[in-house]
Amino acid sequence: MRSNRREFLRTTLGSSAILSLGATLPDFLRAAAATGTDDKDTILVVVQLSGGNDGLNTVIPFSDPAYKKARPTLAIPTSDVLKIDDTLGFHPSARGLADLLEDDSLAIVQGVGYDNPNRSHFESMDIWHTCQRKSDTRTTGWLGRYLDATQANKSGASLALHLGHEKQPLALTATGVSVPSISSLESFRLNDSGDKEVRSTISKLAASKQDESDSLLGFLQSTTTVALAASQRVEQASRDYKTPVTYPDSELAKKLKTVAQLIDSGLGTRVYYVTLDGFDTHSQQPAAHAALLSQLGGAVSSFVKDIDHHGQSDRVAVLAFSEFGRRVAENASEGTDHGAAAPMFLAGKKVRAGLIGKHPSLTDLEDGDLKFHTDFRQVYATVLESWLGWPNESVLGGKFKTVEAFSA
Amino acid sequence: MSLTKIDPTWAWTPYRPSESQPWNRIRAAHLFRRAGFGATSQELDAAVGRDPDEIVAGLVTPNLDAEFESESDAFATTILASGNPKQLSAWWSYVMLRTPHPLLEKTTLFWHGHFATSAAKVEDAGAMYAQNRLFRQYALGDFGKLTHAIARDPAMLIYLDSVTNRKAHPNENFARELMELFCLGEGNYSEKDIQELARCFTGWEIRRGSFRFNRFQHDTGSKSIFGQTGPMPESESIDIVLDQPAAPQFIVRKLIRYFLFDEPAASDELVAPLANELSEHAWDIGHVVRRILSSQLFYSDQVIGRKVRSPVDLVVGLLRTLEGSTNAYQLGDDLDMLGQGLFYPPNVKGWDGGRAWINSSTLLGRANVIGRIVRDEKTRFAGVNLKAYFDQLDADSPAAIVDQLVELTLAVEPSQTVKEQLVEVIKRPGDRSQRIAEAIHALSTIPEFQVM
C-alpha cells in the first residue's frame, strides 16, 4: 500500500499539466506529500438509504404482539428472523448485517429521529443533511461544515468524495471546499483524444482567473479546476487494485469496492459518500425491501472484509442512515407510508458492536409513528468527536451528547 | 446585485426596445436560448427585424406543423414497437432538435420535471409516451385541467403506487405529492390534510393500463380538507387543492425559476402579480409564460447569464445553434450520462436544476460529450463540415470564427485571454474543421459555456 502511495505522489507530481491548474492542487499535494500522516487519519464512509427505510422490518421486535397486529401481511415470521436477542432480530435478507454483528463490527443505534418529524422525503432529507429546519437559511451540509473547518487548518483539497450518478448530497455542500462527484472511475477523465496541445489549452483556460464578484461563474470555475485535478489523481489511484474478497453483484457493492480501492491508493480523502435508493416502499414492499436489505448487508460486509484484508480496518467506519422510518401500520397496497424514528447503523472493526438504546414502543406512538429517543445529531456528534476527532458544536449548531458507538 | 430587491412593477412591465436597451442579436439570442434551445445566425438576423413581443406571442401559440408532426409520430411508432422505454429518449431528443415549436417542447420538458415520473419504475413505454403527449397538450394551456388529467394518468399512478387504492388503508403517496410537489409546496398543508385527501383517492385504480374508478373501494365518508368538509367525491378534492392561494404562487415561482434565474427563489412580492394573473386567467400557463418572456426583468442583467444550462440546453442548444445533426440514440444516452435522462427523472421531485447540474463528473462529461460530437466526422452542420459552415457565415479567419462562436453560443462574454487562446487553437496547422472542433471542445470547458 505504501509503495502505491509513493508511486501515486511521484507520478502525480511529475505531471506538468496538473501543476498548471492553479493554486488549489499544489496546496493539496504539498499537504499530502509533507505530512505522510494521512495514512493514519480515520475515514468515514456514509451510506445514505434514500426513500425512507422501514426500520421496523429491518431490526424487528418479533416478540412484541403489537408488531404482528400492525403488520398483518408484512410481518416477518418469528422463525425467519435472524435473532439478535430474545426480542429483536434482523430481517432474513439482512444476513450481511447479522454477519457484521457476529463479527463485532456493527453498532445499531435504535430509535433515531428528531423533534416534530417532517414526512416529506425532500424536507426530511434536507434536515438530515443540514441539521437545520426549513425556517433556517440552509446553504451548507453538516459534512460540508466539517470540511470547511478542517480545510481552514490544513489548506488541502478533496477531503471528501461523492460516488454516484445522482446529484451531490447537500450534506457535502461547503462554502470553501468543492467536493468532487464521481459517477464511475472509467468515465471520470477528460477525453482529449490524446491531443496534448488541446489538453494544455483546456488547462490554461481552467487556470484563467474568474471575476470574483460573480459567484455563479466562480463556482463553475472552482468546480472545473477541482474536476480536472481530481480526475488525474483518481485515474492514477484506480489502477491495479487486487482483492481476494468477492463483492456481490450490486450497485452499492461496486461503489464500496471503488471506495476500498481509493482508500488503498493512499488518497487523502477523509469522507466518502454513497447512496442506495429505492426504500420508498408504499406498495409491494416484501420483495423490494428484501432485495435492498440484502444489497446493503452484502455490500457493507464485503467492504469491511476488504478493508480489513488491506490493513485499513482500524481507520475506516461506515455510517448508514435514512431520512425517516415508515408508518407502524401497513397500508392496503402491501406497503408502508412515511413514518418517523428508525435505527441507524455504524459498521467497522472499531465500533462498539451491539444494540444502543431501546427499540421504540409500538404502542406509544405519535401520529401512528415510532417516537425517537436519540436525536440523529447525537450520532453525528459521536462520529465527529469519537471518530473524526473534531468538536461537534460548530458543525452541528449546538452541543449534542454523544452515544457510545466506538470502542475506546 | 440582489434579486430579492427587484421591484415587481418594474420587473413585469413589458420590455420595449430603446436606445439603451436595443433589440439586437444579443437580446434575440437570449430570448431563443431561454424560450427554446438557441437560434442559428440566420434566425437571429430574421428576429432583429421583427417586434420581440410579436415573436413571443408566436412562440406561445404554436400552429402545429403537420409535416413535422407526422415525422415525429412515425419515429415514435417505431420506438414504441420496440417496447423499450429507454429508446423514448432518442425520440424526444430528436423532437427537441428538430421541432418548429421550441417553446412548446421546453415547456413540455418543464412539466415532465414538475410531474416527474420515471420509466425506471413505470416500465411501460406506451404509458410514458401517453403522459408525454399529455404534457405537450397542456404545456402552454390550462394547469387545472392538466392536474386533473395527471391524477388519472396511468404512468403517474403506477409511479406513485396508486395502481390499487383501497378504503381500508389508503395509500398516501399520491395525495402527499399532489400537495407537496405538484400544487402547493411543502409547508402549505398539514399531515391531516394529506390523510384526508388520500381518502378521497380511494377507489382510483389502474386496470389493464387504464384509469378506473372502483366505487366499492371508495371511502364515501365525510372528509375535511383545508377547513372544508364533505364527502368530496371524485375530482372535487383536487379543486379544493387548486383553490388554495398557495397554488398559483407555487406554480409561478417555479416558472420564474425555469425561465428566469436559478437562485435565489423569487420573492413573494415578485411572484404575487403573476400569481394573481394566473388565477384571473383561469390557470392559463401560456399567458404567464408570455408575460415572463416579454418582461423588462427578462432582458435585464439580473437574468442574462444567470441560469445554469441543463444538459438539454447545453447539447441540444449547441446543435440547434450550429444546425448540427447527430445520432438521436446517442444523444439520449448522453443526456442521461449528464444527469438528465429523459423519461428517467431522478425522483418525484424531478431535476433540481441550477447548481445541482454541476459537479466534477458532469463537467468532465459535458466536455467529453461536446468534444465527441464536434470531433466526430459524421457530425454535419447544415449538411457540411465546420470549416464550410463558418465560411457560409462569412467567418473565414480564426478570430472571426471565435467571435461568431462566442456570439452564438455564449450569454456571457469570456475574457480576451480566453478568446485569444481559442484563436490559437484554430490557427494551428492541419485540417481547419478539426481545429474548429477542438476550439469548440476547449470552449465547452469554460464556466461561461455552462450558463445562459
Image (spheres, helix red, strand yellow):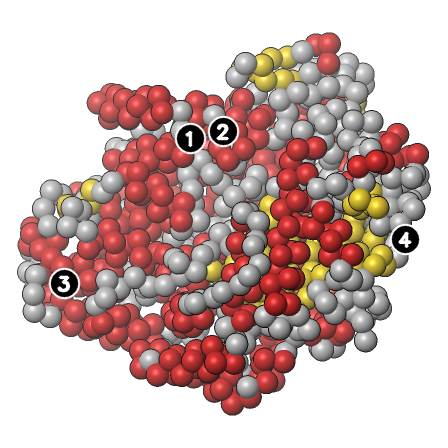
* Among numbered discs 1 and 3, the one appearing first in the sequence: 1
| Observer-nearest of B305 and B368 | B368
Q: Are marks 4 and 2 on the same chain?
A: no
**SS class of the residue under badge 2?**
loop
| Amino acid bearing label 1 | Pro
Image position of A65 (left or right of A24): right
Quote the CA–CA distance across marks 3 and 2. Answer: 43 Å
Q: Residues within 10 Å of mark 2 (few under 14, many from 20)?
A: some
| Amino acid bearing label 2 | Glu
Q: Residues within 10 Å of mark 3 (few under 14, many from 20)?
A: many
| Residue A332 found in image quarter | top right
Q: Are discs 2 and 1 less than 8 Å apart at CB?
A: yes
Label 4 marks a residue whose chain is A
Please give the residue where the numbered disc 2 appears in the rendered image: B123
Please give the residue where the numbered disc 3 appears in the rendered image: B435
Asked whether residue B340 is in view, the answer is yes
Quote the CA–CA distance across marks 1 and 3. Answer: 38 Å
Asked whether residue B282 is in view, the answer is no
Please give the residue where the numbered disc 1 appears in the rendered image: B85
Residue found farthest to the top? B216
Residue found farthest to the front? A244
Q: Residue at x 13, y 66 (%)?
A: B426
Q: Residue at x 19, y 51 (%)?
A: B376
Quote the CA–CA distance across marks 4 and 2. Answer: 41 Å
Please give the residue where the numbered disc 4 appears in the rendered image: A358
